Amino acid sequence: MTSTITTRHRRIRISLWIFVTSIMLALGGAYFFRAIGDREPPPETRGEAAIRSDFSLIDHNGKRVTEADFLGRWQLVFFGFTYCPDVCPTTLAYLGNVLDQFGGEVERVAPIFITVDPSRDTPQVMADYVQAFHPKLIGLTGSEAEVAAAAQSFRVYYEKMEEGTAPDGYLMAHSGHMYLMTPEGRFEDVFREGDQSAQEMAADVLARMNGKQ
């Protein structure tokens, strides 16, 4: 019964995100999306089916990969950038803690960090960055167009924002959700650091992986 109630609450939460995003877009969209962190926008979905794992990018080892390379594994996908001052390092450290909770089951998971700042986040930069958080973490980059296409497939918002005190004079505003995708690349759920402990998120994901939810 508890599992059923939790699932129902999660579906209601996602439906509310969809409704709020639709209202924002109708009223001018980008005007509301002017923050990084706690005030970042929810996933830009038009229903759960609109979110899909679909990309062609370069991994942190310099290899071209697509979503097909991760079929058969549960994907945990987060979009951000290496110059991010707060949300990204906090979320990736949290994700690393989640991965540590999986034990041997971690081999069934593909934890993916996709940059929204490809002009600075080269494969080498991504390699140095992701290894600081977890040895299983996969960093992906590409051209501006390739990153935009990947973000669109996940319905992820991001925007370049001028900031004089930041390196190169800008930051990237972006959504801060971790997307859980099934081994077939379908949307399962979204998580956010701070909404639950790493232990609770790991238990939730493991239950789904093992068909207990």
Image: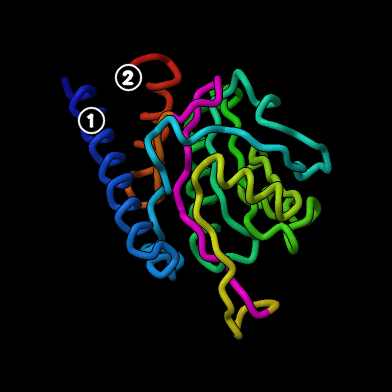
22 within the magenta span = no
> Is there a contact, CB below 8 Å, between mark 2 and mark 1?
yes
Q: Quadrant of the C terminus?
A: top left
Which quadrant of the figure has residue 24? bottom left
Give the residue type at disc 2.
Gln
Q: Is residue 176 left or right of residue 16?
A: right
Secondary structure of residue under mark 2: loop
Label 2, label 1: how many angstroms apart (C-alpha)? Answer: 9 Å
> Helix, strand, or loop for circle 1?
helix
Q: Tell me if mark 1 has few (under 14), some (14-19) or many (20+) residues whose alpha carbon lies within 10 angstroms of its own.
A: few
Q: Which quadrant of the figure contains the N terminus?
A: top left
Question: Residue at the spot x=59%, y=68% of the render?
Answer: 160
Residue 34 drawn at (x, y percent): 44, 70
Label located before the other in sequence (2 or 1): 1
**Which residue of the protein is positioned furthest toward the right in this rendering?**
62
Three-letter residue code for mark 1: Thr
Q: Which residues are magenta?
A: 169-187
Neighbor class of circle 2 (other Cα within 10 Å; few <14, some 14-19, many 20+) is few
Residue at x 79% of width, y 50% of height: 123
Using the image, tell me which numbered label, if any, was put on residue 213: 2
On the rendered structure, is 130 left or right of 183? right
Residue 185: x and y in percent read 55, 26
Relative to 25, is 31 above or below? below
What residue is disc 1 on? Answer: 6
Name the residue rendered at 38%, 29% in the picture.
203
